[in-house]
Image (tube, helix red, strand yellow):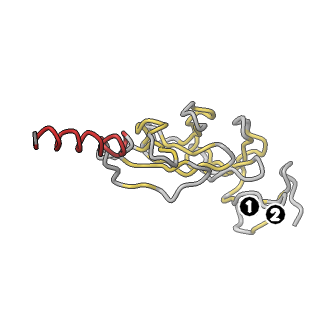
């Protein structure tokens, strides 16, 4: 009788624990953004869990970052970066050498072959060509970029230097 009570108690306790915590041990969990957290599994692969700890996007990426404006940067097995949406669909193909995060609908991306920076929109379209030595995200309509001579400028969303 005591054994039956212990088994029933254990079964009850397990129903209180989310399934992902019961079967997965994350080596790392981000602080999260937009209700999602990137996690790293024991194999070193990254995926995403929601606020309840449920695995939403499987751990298959070599690196990942938090969600901004509904998209998170992910790095594939070839070392290229792209973006997934909150369902795990690859929204922007992995083809960039490096990426920043989306802000004001734009994201700084680095061309893998030239190592120069430009900006894409949320559909993945390159809207400001990769011509800068470095770039920072847009803030209040402007982004800071560094030219080939090391001088910093501010550009607008058309790529025009304004300062």
The C terminus: image quadrant: bottom right
Residue name at image x 43 percent, y 55 percent: 29
Q: Which structural element holds mark 2?
A: strand
Query: Between residues 41 and 95, which one lies in front from this camera angle?
Result: 41
The N terminus: image quadrant: top left
Q: Earlier in the sequence, mark 2 or mark 1?
A: 1
Q: Which residue is mark 1?
A: 145
Q: Which structural element holds mark 1?
A: strand
Residue name at image x 86 percent, y 48 percent: 158
Report which quarter residue 94 is drawn in.
Answer: top right
Residue name at image x 66 percent, y 59 percent: 134
Residue name at image x 62 percent, y 53 percent: 100
Name the spot of residue 120 as percent of width and height, x first: 72, 43
Name the spot of residue 104 as percent of width and height, x first: 78, 51
What is the CA distance from the residue labelled 2 to the residue labelled 1? 6 Å
Q: Which residue is mark 2?
A: 154
- Tally of marks: 2
Query: Between residues 25 and 133, which one lies in front from this camera angle?
Result: 25
Left or right of residue 28, residue 102 in this image? right
Left or right of residue 78, residue 100 in this image? right
**Contact check, label 2 and label 1, Cβ < 8 Å:** yes
Name the spot of residue 161 as percent of width and height, x first: 86, 59
- In the rendered view, would you say 13 is above or below 90? below
User: What crowding class fits label 1: few (fewer than 14 Cα within 10 Å), some (14-19), or many (20 or more)?
Assistant: many
């Amino acid at each position: 009788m005591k054994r039956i009570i212990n088994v029933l108690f254990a079964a009850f306790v397990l129903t209180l624990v989310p399934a992902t915590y019961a079967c997965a041990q994350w080596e790392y969990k981000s602080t999260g953004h937009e209700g999602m957290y990137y996690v790293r599994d024991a194999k070193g692969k990254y995926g995403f869990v929601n606020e309840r700890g449920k695995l939403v996007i499987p751990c298959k990426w070599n690196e990942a970052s938090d969600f901004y404006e509904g998209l998170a940067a992910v790095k594939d097995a070839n070392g290229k970066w792209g973006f997934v949406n909150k369902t795990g669909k690859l929204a922007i193909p992995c083809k960039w050498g490096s990426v920043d995060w989306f802000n004001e609908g734009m994201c700084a991306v680095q061309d893998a072959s030239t190592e120069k920076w430009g900006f894409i929109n949320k559909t993945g379209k390159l809207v400001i060509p990769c011509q800068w030595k470095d770039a920072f995200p847009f803030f209040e309509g402007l982004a800071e970029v560094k030219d080939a001579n090391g001088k910093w400028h501010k550009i607008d969303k058309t790529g025009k230097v304004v300062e």
